[in-house]
Image (tube, rainbow, N blue to C red):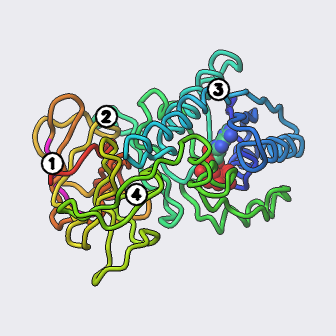
Amino acid sequence: MGKVVVGLSGGVDSSVAAAALHAQGYDVIGLTLWLMKGKGQCCSEGMVDAAFICEQLGVPHHIVDSRELFQKEIIDYLVSGYEAGITPLPCSQCNKAVKFSPMLHYARETLETDTIATGHYARIRFSPENNRYQLLRAVDKNKDQSYFLYDLTQDVLRGTLFPLGEQTKAETRRIAQEFGLKTADKPDSQDLCLIEAHGTMRSFLDKYIAVSEGDIVDLDGKVLGKHSGIHHYTIGQRKGIGIAAAEPLYVVKLDPVMNRVIVGNRASAVSADCLVGRMNWVSIAEPTTPIRAQVQVRYRSPAVPVNVIPLENEQVKLVFDEPQFSITPGQAAVIYEGEIVLGGGIISGVTP
Ligand SMILES: Nc1ncnc2c1ncn2[C@@H]1O[C@H](COP(=O)(O)OP(=O)(O)OP(=O)(O)O)[C@@H](O)[C@H]1O
C-alpha cells in the first residue's frame, strides 16, 4: 500500500486517520508540526498525545518545529490584518502555508513518499473530464471542513488522503473506541487553536496590538461613543458595542485611517455584492465568463446562490441573488457547485 505521512495533532480525528490507514496496510509515519508554545492542541499536549498514538500503533513519529513559520504566516498575518481593520481567516492560510505544502515537502524530502493524510472532513477525487483533482464536501455536513481547504493546490490534492471524508464524526468516535485509542474520548476542539491557547481572540490580539482609543460613529459621522481599538470589532457584530439606541446597532465598517468604528442598523450591514481577491480555482480551470454557483461567505453560513463574474488579477465579483448580511473583508468566500468546491478567495471589499 505504500508509505503515508499522517499529520497528527493529538486529537481523535487524526488518530483515527492514522489507525485506519495503518489497518489498511499502509506504512504510517506520524508527523506533528509544533506550531506554538503552550498547552493544548498543536502544542505540548498535542505532541505528547500524538507520540502516544504512534507508540500504540507501533509506527515512527516525527516532530517538526514549525513555530517560526506559524509566527510569520499566521500570527503576523492576523495581527497586521486586524490592525488594518479586516478580520482575517487564519485556518485556510494555515492549511495552505503551514500544514499541507510543508508536510508534503517534508514527506518527499525526508521520508521518501509523495503521500500525506490528515483527519480533515472533506473528500478529494480525480476528474478525468478536466484532468483535475477536485475537492468535495465531507459526507458529514456538520463537520465538513472543505471551506478551510479551498486554497490547496493541485500538487497538494494529488498527494493527499482524507480517510475521514466518507464517515460521520460519530463513526470516527466509534472507530477510535474499537481501536482502543487513547484519544477516543478526547473532547473536540471548540475554537481556533490560537484561541484555545490564549483564552479569547481579544486577549490574544491585546498581546500584540496596543490599545488605541477612538470614536464609534454612525453612518453620517456623528460620534456615538468610544472604542478601545478597532481590532476588538468585526463587521456584523452587534453585542459589545455598548451604545444604547432605538434599534439594534451593528458594526458596518472599520476605518483604520481615522481609527473609527462605524455602526448602523441591520439594513446597512447588508451587501448585494462583493469583491474577492487571491482566487484559487480548485476543481475547475479559471473561468473566463460569468458562472452560476453557490457561495459560502463564512464557515458556518449556508451556501447561497450567486453570479460569479471573473475579473483581472485573480479577482472575481460576486453578485448575490439575495443581499447578504455582514460580508467581512478578510474572510474567505468559497464557491461551490453542489458538493464540489470550485474555488475560493479572500473578500476584499463590498460595494457601498
Ligand atoms: N500540529 C499539527 N501537526 C500535524 N498535523 C496537524 C496539526 N494540527 C492539525 N493537523 C492535521 O489537520 C487535521 C485537522 O485539524 P484541526 O485543527 O481542524 O483539528 P480537528 O478537526 O479537531 O482534528 P483532530 O481531532 O485530529 O485534532 C488534523 O486531523 C490533523 O491531521
Q: Amino acid at mark 4?
A: Thr
Q: Residues within 10 Å of mark 3 (few under 14, many from 20)?
A: few
Quick check: 206 left or right of 292?
A: right
Q: Amino acid at mark 3?
A: Glu
Q: CA distance from mark 1 to mark 4?
A: 30 Å
Q: CA distance from mark 2 to mark 1?
A: 18 Å
Q: Amino acid at mark 1?
A: Ile
Q: Residues within 10 Å of mark 4 (few under 14, many from 20)?
A: many
Mark 2, residue position: 278
Q: Secondary structure at mark 3?
A: helix
Quick check: 206 left or right of 46?
A: left
Query: Residue 124 has which mark?
Result: none
Quadrant hosting residue 63: top right
Discs 3/2, front: 3
Q: Secondary structure at mark 1?
A: strand
Of the numbered discs 3 and 2, the one sitting upstream in the chain is: 3
Q: Secondary structure at mark 2?
A: strand
Dots 2 and 4: beta carbons under 8 Å?
Answer: no
Query: Residue 68 has which mark?
Result: 3
The image position of residue 147, as x and y in percent, is: 43, 51
Discs 3/1, front: 3
Q: Residues within 10 Å of mark 2 (few under 14, many from 20)?
A: some
Q: CA distance from mark 3 to mark 2?
A: 24 Å
The image position of residue 285, as x and y in percent, is: 25, 34
The image position of residue 230, as x and y in percent, is: 42, 51
Mark 4, residue position: 234
Magenta stretch in the rendered image = 304-309
Quadrant hosting residue 128: top left
Q: Amino acid at mark 2?
A: Arg
Q: CA distance from mark 4 to mark 3?
A: 27 Å
